[in-house]
Amino acid sequence: MVDVVLLAIRIFLSIALPWWIVRRDMKKLSEDQLARAWNDVSFWIAVVVFNELCIPVHFLKVRRSLLGLALGIFWLAVAIGVNVGVLYELGSLFAV
């Protein structure tokens, strides 16, 4: 039963973290960069299907620079680190 709960948390985090990171970034974009961003349907498809991997694609797509790629890789590492850290702590809490 604990495995099912951990799986549900993993799925939730793998959708919620990229959603939060990309939406947070979209608030800071210029008009030109925002025009290159995903529309709502494409955004949700990218987040649900590709999970954390959509983060560097978003940053590279809207910024079109190496800085965008570096930011995307940084936020990808943050998302994966948070996801793994939370699951590790919960797993050790439940002694799985």
Image (spheres, helix red, strand yellow):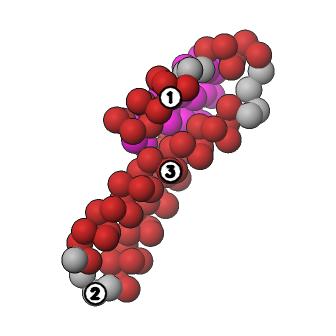
Judge by depth and name the residue closer to the eye, 41 or 10. Answer: 41
Quarter of the image for residue 51 reads top left
Residue picked out by circle 2 = 95
Q: Residues within 10 Å of mark 1 (few under 14, many from 20)?
A: some
The label shown at residue 16 is 3
Judged from the image, the secondary structure of the residue bearing numbered disc 1 is helix
Q: Determine contact: label 1, label 3, CB under 8 Å.
A: no
| Residue 74 shows in the view | no
Quadrant where the C terminus sits is bottom left
Nearer the camera: disc 2 or disc 3: 3
- Name the disc covering residue 43, or none: 1
Direction from residue 73 to residue 6 in the image, left or right: left
**What x and y, as percent, mark residue 62?**
61, 20
Front one among 30 and 40:
40
Inspect the magenta stretch and tell me whether residue 62 lies in it: yes
N-terminal-most mark, 1 or 3: 3
